[in-house]
Amino acid sequence: MSAAPSVTTRTQGVQSSRLRGVLRSERVPVPALAVLALICLVMLAVNPSFLSLGNLSTLAIQAAVPAVLAVGLTFVVLMGGIDLSLEGVMGAAGMTTAVLLLNDRTGNNLGLWAVLAAMLVGAGLGALSGLSVAFLRVPSFIVTIGTWQIGLGIAQLLFAGKPPRIQDATFLSFAIDRVAGLPVLVWTAIVVVLIGMWIQRYSRFGRYAMVVGGGEDIARLSGIPVRRIRVYGFVLSGLCAGLAGAMATARTGVGDVGIGTGQLFITIAGVVIGGTVLTGGRGGVLHSVVGVIVMAALANGMVLAGVSSFIQQAVLGAIVVVAAVVTMWRLRARLRVVK
């Protein structure tokens, strides 16, 4: 009668030791950093201005929004899910920011409270996705496609046929004013990344997310509230998407329903290239952010090299496919070693 509990205990011990090994061995995304270094060397040979301070600043600005998106998405992916609603959430959050700030269409003037409102819109849409996945057991890719469209619908409703032009100088200054050579938006992204790394490594939620991705059954046997953790993951993803929508709106200075167009691809591509495995349980925030920087650096370098936009799309897509194949091959190899 006591055999079953002992087997369970041993299983939990093996799973726990594997998790500790993963956390020790994969804190630094060495492969992604090696790829980034190779890109820098190649692009430097093609165009020496690639590593100029001006271009590095431009690169940081280009990577800021998808880096914030990647922080939230990483926690969903670590649990074996996916969030495809990012562009819709950004649209809803961006329009919320624009209509609540001082603008040329409405009489609203909530100041920077509008950014908080945008983040709450994102968190609400994320909670809708999380509750559907955790309690109704609907696949995350189906649910988040739906919340993507809900977000776009909210954005269209707020748009009302006329784009609001933001007149709040304080808000617009975040995309213009520089601290130590970088816009405030870039520093905002850096702070979000650092917070995400802290959450993953030191918070109970971050540790639980990794365990859930490594094995949901083991997580339940360990007493982890799996459903609640999944909801928290989607809420965090939506919160980051809401902030990203506000950041992108600060750059354009106008409410735009399609403010998030193209961000989903670079974010998911960054997660894959960085080594955060889509099946869950491996990778992390730093991995995903380095992957986003790789994508931004590659796109930036091809622009400087005069590569056609069509070829750029093909190259970026091919790199994502290769990265996914290599990541899964490495994962299967490790599983064979464990067996």
Image (cartoon, rainbow, N blue to C red):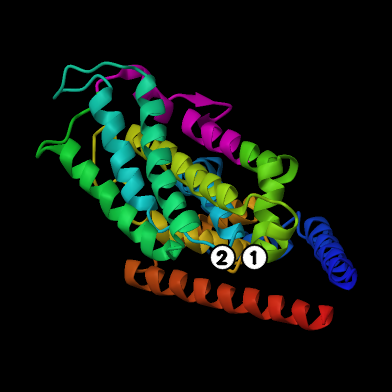
**Residue 37 drawn above or below residue 124:** below
Residue depicted at 48% across the width and 61% down the height: 82
Neighbourhood count class around disc 2 (C-alpha, 10 Å): few under 14, some 14–19, many 20 upward: many
CB atoms of marks 1 and 2 within 8 Å:
no
- Decide which of 136, 96 is in the foreground and name it: 136
Mark sitting earlier along the chain (1/2): 1
Q: Circle 1 sits on which residue? A: 35
| Residue 264 spot, x, y in % from top left | 40, 57
- Up the image or down, 14 lies above or below 338; here it is above
Q: Residues within 10 Å of mark 1 (few under 14, many from 20)?
A: some
The chief SS type of the magenta part is: helix
Give the numbered dot on residue 272.
2
Could you say where residue 61 lies in the image, as x and y percent from the top left? 47, 42
Asked if the stretch drawn in magenta spans residue 190, the answer is yes
- Measured as percent of width and height from the top left, residue 124 is found at 39, 39
Residue at x 54% of width, y 55% of height: 76
Identify the image quadrant of the C terminus.
bottom right
Q: Give amino acid for label 2.
A: Val
**Disc 1 element:** helix
Q: Nearer the viewer, residue 320 or 217?
A: 217
Mark 2 lies on a secondary structure that is: helix
Task: Kindly identify the amino acid type of the residue bearing the numbered disc 1.
Answer: Val
**Whether residue 167 is visible:** yes
**What residue is shown at x 40% (from left), y 74% (from top)?**
314
Which x, y percent locates residue 233? 54, 48
Q: Which residues are magenta?
A: 167-193
Label of residue 226 in the image: none
Q: Is residue 325 magenta?
A: no
